[in-house]
Image: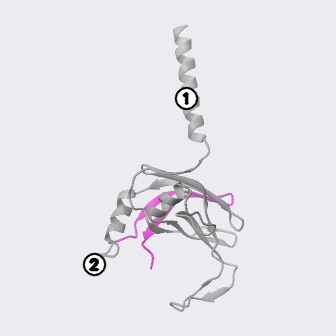
Amino acid sequence: MLKTISTLAAAVLIAGIALAADAPLKGFTRDGNDDLFGYYMSSTPVRVGKMELDHMHIGMKEDLVKWEKGIERLDTYAPIMFQFTDTGSKMVKNEENGQMYHQNLPRVLPTAYRIQGNTIAWTGTSKEVGAVSFTGTIDRKKIAKFNAGAGTEAGPGDTSAAVIKGDLTVAGKVFKNIALSWSGGD
């Protein structure tokens, strides 16, 4: 009898853990107080139809705090978002550097995200791109080091190594094990 009860208790515990792991991502949470700011580019093309991933962006920690508290939420920007290039859109000239780029750069804002330890989970949707989700690992220490060196004479050093790795789903198409490297922007 005791063995049966122990077996049932173990089964309930395992089922509870499995359900918790499969629970949908909700809210906007992050542990730590580190600076994760950056633009994260894929080393391999990520394209679905005419939409191509331009970058993942993580904003300043002050912007993350405001977003997580429900303050200053915009329809055009979130402190963790994905930006795509609509390769079918008109080409226009950048007034600052004269380079040509596609005019339509849709952004996918989050419906939920969680950064906990060295893991990141993110989900969002947009009318143009569709549903987007990402789960993976994040090298918080390396990103903090890059940010600490940015703007200094020494600079952030070699930023070509992947600092975020994981699986990205765009409009139902899964891209396994993509690697994202850090840039501090222009």
Residue at the spot of label 1: 14
Image coordinates of residue 104 in percent, x first then y, are 66, 78
Give the vertical position of 156 relative to 70 (above or below): below
* Alpha carbon separation for disc pair 2 and 1: 53 Å
Magenta part of the protein: which range? 158-186
Helix, strand or loop at label 1? It is helix
| Outermost front residue | 71
Task: Identify residue type, mark 2.
Answer: Glu
Judge the density around disc 1: few (<14), some (14-19), many (≥20) Cα neighbours within 10 Å. few
Residue 119 against residue 73 in the figure, above or below: above
Nearest to N terminus: mark 2 or mark 1: 1
Q: Position of residue 79 (x, y in %)?
A: 52, 64
The residue shown at (70%, 79%) is 88
Residue that appears at 69% across and 73% down:
50
Instruction: Pick whichever, 81 or 51, lies toward us.
Output: 81
Which residue has dot 2 on it? Answer: 153
How many numbered callouts?
2
